[in-house]
Structures are given as structure tokens and as C-alpha cells.
Image (cartoon, helix red, strand yellow):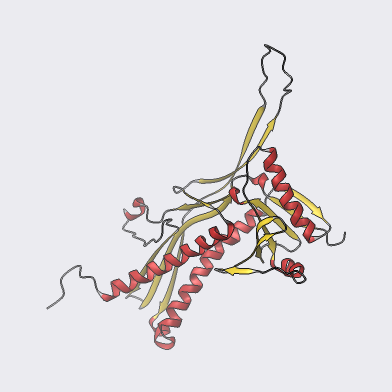
Amino acid sequence: MASKANLTKVANIDGYVREIDFATRFGLNWDALREILGIMRPIRKTPGTKLTSYLASVTLQDGDVGEGEEVPYSLATVEPVAYSDLTLEKYAKAVSIEAVNKYGAATAVQKTDAAFLNELTGKVMDRFYTFLQTGTLSGTYATWQMAVSMAIGKVVDKFKKMRRDITEVVVFVNTLDAYSYLGAAQVTIQTQNGISYVKNFLGASTVILSSEIPQNTVIATPVDNIDLYYIDPSDANFASLGLNYTVAGETNLIGVHANGNYNTVVGELFALMGMALWAEYLDGIAVVTVDANP
């Protein structure tokens, strides 16, 4: 006798567990980054939302106002700098039954899942590093240590002039530059979820090492200036299309669906995400360089 309709079978459970595992590990990568930085606000955005940074300034009028005289207004301006929409990105990976038969599921499925996850995480980080390089606070200094110090100083000075409090400053540097300097210093480089960093170094709460930052370039910004914008893949509007993605954690950063395609005899893994790391104030990012020939 055939089984009753809607019976949950082993294949259904296996697929769901794989989806939960993938979504959870993806979320843990971002939790690790938030832990390293100290703070990073996740902000849920609806599809089509513009990513916007701001350039803020105030022109003060003379404050020496006589008794009974009208106090003049100081002109405050905030200029938005709009970039691209926060859009949904769709990815898929498939593994053939022949690959599983030859190499086993541990290699053909699990290892490729891990590589898939790393590429998705890296894509978001690469865009963020590119965006950081558009910061408007600039300068050139003779040494790498001075560049780090002045990048932090420029950020602190800028936010003091804006009358905004900042808690900690994070610095981004090229990996080779950092190792060249740290080779003669008693400093411990830590690594978590693929991110290398140094805590409490040269006035920065965190220094992140990345090969995506050009050599002889130092970037600094307050941790408070960094936001994580995301679209929730489990949005009910998407489900109305019959597309149900598995999400995990408090912040639904990625949706995952595993599916066996009997037409092509492959196991498919689909990922849906819309997320970006962003800085609220573009003029709150210092991008300074080291003069190679001072």
C-alpha cells in the first residue's frame, strides 16, 4: 500500500537539516564580525530600498547676540549620497549523483557547501571594502604607523566637529603591510571565521587585516558608523510565489532551500540574500596613504 499523502520522509528531514545548518553557519560568520567590531546594527530593509550615506555640515553664525536681539540661525545641511538599490541576489549550486558516488557525500556535498558559504560571505565583504575606499577624509604620511594614527585622529576630529559621540574606531589595513610592521612587534594576531584582526592597537579598538585593502592604504571609521542592511528572505510576499526559504537565527540574513532534481539527477542548493555593510557618514571614513618615497 502506498504511503499517505504529505508524509514527512527521511529526504525531507535531511534537506531541512542541511538548510538550517547552512543558514546558521552563515549567520555565525556575521555574528563573529559583530563580535570582533564590538557593534554593528542590523537594519531590516524592504526590497528596492536605496542605500544612502550622508555628508553633514553646519555653518555657525556669530553667537555674540545683543540683549533682546534676534538670534540668527546657523545653517545645517545634510547632503545624501545615494548608491545602488539593496537588491535580492539569487545563487544556486548543484552536485551530481555521479560526484557523490565517486567522492562520497562528505566531499561532494559538505565541502562544496562550505566553499559556497565562504564565497557568499566574501562577496559581501569585498563590496564593503570597495565602499570603504570611497571615504572622503584623506591624507598622506611618511610611515605606516603614522598613517594608522592619523587615520584614527581624522575620524575622531571629524565626529567631534559634528558634535557626535563615538565609542570605538575600527581600522582596515592591507595584510602584507600589517605583517611587515608587526614582524618586529610583540602583537598577537587573532583569527575568527576567516577574519584576521588585532585588538587595541595604536589607538584603534580593532585593526582588521585584509588583502582587499590596497597596500600603503589605511582606512578608519567609528564602529558606530557601520550598519548592516538586509532583506529578510522569509518575507511573506516571497512566500506568496510558492518560494519558501529556510532561515535561522534572530536576524534572517540568508534564505536556503535544498532540493533534489530528479530530471537531471542532481542535488540542488539555492541561496537568497540581499545584504550590504554600509557607513552612515561617508565623510566619517578616513582613507589615508603611506608615501612610499617620502
Q: Quadrant of the N terminus?
A: bottom left
Q: Residue placed farthest to the right in the image? A: 294
Q: Residue placed farthest to the left in the image? A: 1
- The residue drawn where x is 80% and y is 53% is 140
Front residue of 13/112: it is 13
Residue 167, above or below 256: above
Front residue of 259/79: it is 79
Residue 41, above or below 32: above
Front residue of 145/124: it is 145
Residue 222 on image: x %, y %: 63, 50
Numbered disc total: 0
Residue 195 on image: x %, y %: 59, 66
Q: Quadrant of the C terminus?
A: bottom right
Q: Residue placed farthest to the front in the image? A: 186
- The residue drawn where x is 46% and y is 62% is 27
Q: Residue placed farthest to the top in the image? A: 68
Residue 150 on image: x %, y %: 76, 52
Residue 73 on image: x %, y %: 66, 22
Front residue of 169/79: it is 169
In the image, taking residue 91 as reference, residue 167 lies left or right, namely right
Instruction: Give the quadrant of residue 98.
Output: bottom left
Residue 36, above or below 76: below
- The residue drawn where x is 72% and y is 17% is 65
